[in-house]
Amino acid sequence: MNKVKSHREGSALLTGRIAGALLVIFLGLVAGIILLGRFTGPPPLAPPHESQPVLAAVSAEHLAATAADEVSNSRKNAIVRAAEVVSPAVVSISVTQVRIVTRSPFGSMFRDPLFEYFFPELSRRYRQEIKSMGSGFLINGDGYILTNEHVVENASQIIVNLAAGRQFEGQLLGSDPALDLALVKVEGQNLPSAPLGDSDDLIIGEWAIAIGNPFGYILKDSRPSVTVGVISAMGRDFDPQRGRVYRSMIQTDAAINQGNSGGPLVNSAGEVIGINTFIFTESGGSLGVGFAIPINTAKRMVEEIVQYGEVRSFWIGIHIQNLSSLIAQSLGYPSTDGVIVTHLDPASPALSSGLRVGDIITAVNGKKIRNERDLKAEFYIAHVGDRIRFTIWRDGQTQTVAFTLRESHEQG
């Protein structure tokens, strides 16, 4: 009995020793792994991917392109954008004009007008073709072109060149020589046009962009040129010159050179506000004093020609003369500024307004009248249907009479 008990106790003791040894070995392995990790450090990182330098290069190119776009956008200010809008519609107009030339049989040194008057058969008269050029601009997709009348005056042929290189033969639809405006028509498809602004809504000092083709045949290039300035003044009036009357003109310091006549004057919004017409110059080049016809004046002429085929003439039925000191004194009028009514046609618009012979007209539509020339100049820019208001002096009092202009064929 005691032997069996002793045997069991020995076996249990052996098993415990084996288990303890295994536990020690396990703990030793764990401790070894931990210590090994501390001394050898973390495993090395994987080598960088080969595409990383390529991505860096792409990013650099993107940054450079973005910077270039920003610079390009900063260069495209309002003036550049306005020129881009209007320039495709600006045209170069090449004109062949016919003039009648008289040559004396004795040569130019011995030319005598009196001799030519009494002996016209001895003078040689012949037609001479002269080439000239100017600018214009398309106002709609139907091919209507605005320009100055002096650009196409006496034209036997009109050739229109677009900025894109297309060429058309132009037809003169109508003109108003007194206002120096003309409307030309071309037949074509997909024609550009320039937006028209409001010349009554201008600000002195705002940007003004003159666009035209001042070089014509010299460069053989129909693309327009651009000059920039400001609106220097408005409402400039000039005395009649060679049958032309320039009223309410826009003054600008944007250079308007030879060949720019008829081209558009544009605001910073890309709208046409005037038609470049003439400059003050001593050398032939621009001195920074140029003048443009207001676009609102041209709009009315275009409406007349498109609707009626011409600028209709009107009838007033009034006869006037300048005031002399003697006449003014006899009437008790304290000045010589103004004109006196000497006759009124029967059934005329002027008579129907209540105007009387002996009335002194001192203003037309609020604009002061100094003499007969001033009054006539105001009617150069008028059209059939306009309402005219006269300020008159009668019997020591100032009064106002008004009437509507009627077409000439309505004359009784």
Image (cartoon, rainbow, N blue to C red):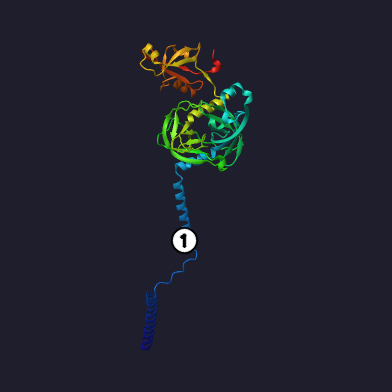
Q: Which residue does the image show at 39% across and 13% down from the upper left?
A: 326
Residue 250 appears at what percent x and percent y?
44, 32
* Count of picture labels: 1
Mark 1 burial class by Cα count in 10 Å: few <14, some 14-19, many 20+: few
- Horizontally, residue 102 falls left or right of residue 318, namely right
Is 256 above or below relative to 407? below
Pick the residue in front: 92 or 115.
Answer: 115
Residue 266 appears at what percent x and percent y?
47, 36
Residue 278 appears at what percent x and percent y?
48, 33
Give residue 43's quadrant in the image: bottom left
Quarter of the N terminus within the rendering:
bottom left
> Does the rendering let one see residue 188?
no
Quarter of the C terminus within the rendering:
top right
Residue 104 appears at what percent x and percent y?
60, 28
Is 24 above or below relative to 137? below
Q: Which residue does the image show at 60% across and 36% down from the upper left?
A: 159
What amino acid is found at the position of numbered circle 1 in the picture? Ala
Give residue 332's quadrant in the image: top left
Q: Secondary structure at mark 1?
A: helix
> Does the rendering let one see residue 409?
yes
Residue under numbered circle 1: 56
Pick the residue in front: 216 or 382.
Answer: 216
- Horizontally, residue 57 falls left or right of residue 3, namely right
